[in-house]
Image (cartoon, rainbow, N blue to C red):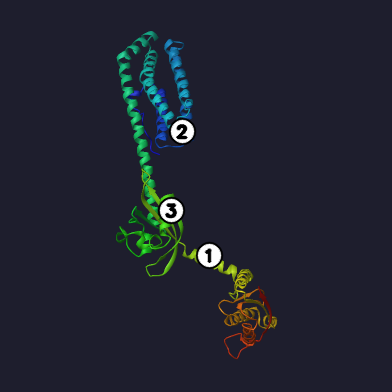
Amino acid sequence: MKAVEIFPWNANFETGIAEIDEQHQQLVKLVNRLASHLAYESDLPGLDEIFGELAAYAQYHFRAEEVIWQEVLAQDPWEIEHRKTHQSFIDDVMRLRNAQGGRSIDVTVEEILSFLCQWLAFHILYSDRRMAQATLAIRAGQAPEEAKRRSNGAMNSTVRALIETVLTMYDSLSNRTLQLVKELTTRQKLEAKLLLAGSVFENTLEAICIVDAAGGIIDANPAFCQSCGQDRGALLGTPIAALKTSLGDDDNAPVVWSTVTDTGHWSGAVHYRTPSGELAAEWLTLSAIRDSSGNVGHYVAVFSSVGGLIQRQQAMEHWAHHDALTGLPNRLLLTDRLDQALAQARRDGKLLAVCYVDLDDFKPVNDQFGHAAGDHVLQVTAERIRKELRGTDTVARVGGDEFVILITGLDHADERLACLDRIRDALRQPIPLGTDPNGPAAHISATIGVSLHLY
């Protein structure tokens, strides 16, 4: 944090007593530190810490200064009055500090700074210099009354009026300096925030574009240009609807635009064509930017590539309902298909056949050739059953070597059950366990039980 000097020290403030001058300079530094924290909008604990340090050091300085005056002017009216001035300073500062009420900390600290600058400058230039001149003269051998008379003459009313005039101008200049620094600090913070936002806009992997109220692109980041296969210059002025069908020709586009205009935001999964012509999925977040009158002036569109996430979600949903080994429906999907088949049978008044298939001689395959061979036999079995069924029928794997077949839309029992004979014949065919046609093969058969349902 750069230092702010609202109270610059110069040689005119020197009293001629080195110890006092050093302490005066330290007080001035603390005042400037307090101003710096206020100018750079530091937190309240930081301001309180410096304020406490300033109050403590002022008390230390006053005690040290009073020791010097009392060496030559003990109980003198000047020394007594000077001591009272010190005490009134502490009282006034604490009163200002505790009088915050509902005001902001900035206003309170600015009042304290104004008081400190005026009081210190006048006190040093007039009161302390007058006391110092008298003290130095007494130390040099003058009588106290003569020393006081000469010192008082040097600090006549004309000089005092001049000091007060300069202090008024000085206080105004100090306040303006503080306000200027605060404005510069605020502007620097805004510039830093804009620089950060610009860096994020340029470097993020999300495709971002800004469009005007009519939907024309007025800016786009590199990721958006890359996703469209065009450079930024070619994209400027192009209607966003011409590049993203989800915002143009899509049936849902009017809903998207009306929602974002009414509520300020819309988000959801959309599809678009890549430059190569492939259909891809992405997540769109569209936000409306309003002007001071509340009218929409711009829209910000952020496109996140979620094709991989959607594919993974679809894969998870698929395997939640399908057997991982054979790809057939599992018990969960079979239950749903059975409910649908029963409802269909009730509507059509047709037969529904539920067939339970149990493989014979499957355990010896695992025992003799291993589990990998057993998995291969199950996969071949599933494919052979599936080939003998219609597209409207269902075959599911419900156990290790157990399958269930749903055959729908039967007018009579013999209509489609003939396919079960073909399935049984297909399963009797040897299943090669390797690439060598003369190599080992598995020989299995199947037992099939059938239950007919007629509503």
**354 shown above or below 61:** below
Amino acid at the residue labelled 3: Thr
Cα distance in 3D space between marks 3 and 1 = 27 Å
Determine crowd level at label 3: few under 14, some 14-19, many 20+ residues with C-alpha closer than 10 A.
some
**Rendered view: 3 above or below 331:** above
Helix, strand or loop under label 3 = helix
Viewer-closest of 22 and 275: 275
Kindly identify which numbered label has been placed on residue 313.
1
Residue annotated with mark 2: 47
Residue 318 locus on image (x, y percent): 56, 69
Residue 15 visible in the picture: no
For the image, the number of numbered tags is 3
Q: Position of residue 157 (x, y in %)?
A: 32, 13
For mark 2, give the secondary structure: helix
- Marks 3 and 1: CB-CB under 8 Å? no
Please state which amino acid type lies under the numbered disc 2.
Answer: Leu
| Amino acid identity at mark 1 | Gln
Comparing 332 with 392, the one in front is: 392
Circles 1 and 2: CB distance less than 8 Å?
no
Q: Earlier in the sequence, mark 1 or mark 2?
A: 2
Left or right of 174 on screen, residue 67: right
Using the rendered view, name the quadrant where residue 341 is placed: bottom right
From the viewer's perspective, tell me whether residue 257 is left or right of residue 310: left
Q: Mark 1: which secondary structure?
A: helix
Percent across and percent down for residue 23 are 42, 25
State which mark lies toward you, 1 or 2. Answer: 1
State the residue in front, 347 or 34: 347
Residue marked by disc 3: 259
